[in-house]
Amino acid sequence: MTCALALTSCDMDLAPVGSLDNGNAVETVKDCLQFRNGMYMNLRSMGTWIGTQSIQGDEFYGIVINGNVYSGVSSGNILSNDGDLSGAWSSSYSVIADANYFINLAEELLDKEEISAVDKQSIARFIGEAKFVRAYAYYVLTDRYCNAYTNVDPTSTVTGVPIKTVYEPSGNQETYPGRSSLEAVYTYIENDLKAAYDALAEWESLPDTPDPYTGLVEEHKQYLVAEAPILNTWVVKAMQCRLALLKGEYATAKTLANEIIESGIYSMTERADVEKLWKNDTSREIIFMPYANNTSELAAALGTTWNSVDPTSSYFIPTASVVNDLYTSRDIRRSVFLSTRELLVDGSTVVTPIFNKYPGNPNLNEVADNNEIRNKSKMFRLSEIYLILAEACYETQDEAGANAALSAIRSRRILLYSSSAVDYSGTELRDQIRLERQRELIGEGFRISDLRRWGLGFDRTNVSYTNAEVAPIVVVASRITYTPGDYRYVWPIPASEMEVNPQLRGQQNPGYGN
């Protein structure tokens, strides 16, 4: 099965390239393994969907040599026919179609007597993994095309996205689903995550047994480690923790965050190793990082959202506020995330700040010595869990816990940081947590979601760079502001979907017409 992420069809059940129409495609555990590989390919790709949301926020400017890359998103000219925005919709539903197809057929195998008990254990595990993938795809949709759960009445109709639970390809437009409530979509995600957790927990509890095909002993707990390339119960908990924060279920988020932290499996990257975390893709704070290599399973060129492989060219640069104000000189993230390039602009060289969080892992280049700016996708990290814990503690009036979680990050990022010298409270504590979340997660696709749920606007107009030559290369149209509650925080349902699905008529997000 080939990856479905390039598809742009409006039919949510369109078969991905690779003959998914064959009802006999899933008959053995070997068949399941083939589909499982496709699902992990989808997961690896989904973990890279961070560029568009990052560019939309207050941290990056487009520059005049970027060839209008993400121009609509960057300038705030958000339209329902923008392909940069609609791609996440069609890709997500293609991933969901893949998962539905596999789950429906694989579950039938569990009732067949000719399938051995050992194979059924593996198949149950694969089904659990597929349900996690489906849940993650629905999370991607809600995080882009829906308002924050805490900002609307989540039980209201058309606050969510259409839900597809089975693979039923059809050209009959009357059978296409309309939008569900946001509560219904989140409930569906939560149920899938619970099923995924239960299936993976069952697998992890089994004794190690020889693989019937290879004879090798498979260790059922081998992926309960940092930098896990395969899903496990801790990855599911990390997703549940993130979801609880988004729902405003702070007590649950706090409990889950503490369980992950106290597991002892993960540890925060120390200051001296932060560069290795991002360049070499290695650290015990990484909870889940889908496998990638430099041949058959290529890592995404994450850094190309901002920088060209041509060292004299770039597409987006950090704003003056990020460069001048976000990090202190003792913060290691300043030197790791920010750098400079000599860009060639209209025949002249301009020394320009660049965003370098994804500098390219040398081991992932297809061609040796060519920096293709490829890095593995770090879908869940312990630092995010600490940030969730800090926010959840604040919201549950546990200021001591919030300060401790905040210090756990800063002490590993800031030279000579003394947690005993800092004791924030009230709104200052809240603002420090939000500031730290921006510092740590910049360029990872969280910013627009955070500003939306916090009810904040932003001002992206400051071009007071230390080097005055930088300001003239900033695209004027990208110097914009969002007011609190700006309708553009929620992306429009793609125009192509609105045209072909009669159930979506009248269900477009506010600000984009019908």
Image (spheres, rainbow, N blue to C red):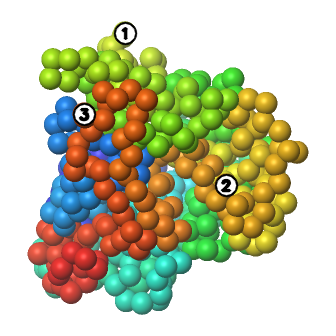
Q: Secondary structure at mark 1?
A: loop
Asked if labels 1 and 2 touch by Cβ distance under 8 angstroms, the answer is no
Q: Nearer the viewer, residue 339 or 218?
A: 339
Q: Is residue 396 above or below residue 460?
A: below
In front of the other: 490 or 126: 490
- Residue lying at the far top of the rendered structure: 369
- Distance between the Cα atoms at labels 2 and 1? 41 Å
Residue at image location 22% in from the left, 50% down from the top: 477
Position above or below: 143 against 58: below
Q: Secondary structure at mark 2?
A: helix
Q: Determine crowd level at label 1: few under 14, some 14-19, many 20+ residues with C-alpha closer than 10 A.
A: few
Residue 485 screen position, x and y as percent: 41, 74
- In three-dimensional space, the C-alpha distance between marks 3 and 1, rounded to whole angstroms, equals 30 Å
Residue at image point 78% right, 57% down: 424
Tell which circle, 2 or 1, labels the residue nearer the N-terminal end. 1
Q: Which residue is mark 3?
A: 473
Identify the image quadrant of residue 191.
bottom right
Q: Earlier in the sequence, mark 3 or mark 1?
A: 1
Residue lying at the far right of the rendered structure? 420
From this viewpoint, is residue 76 visible?
Answer: yes
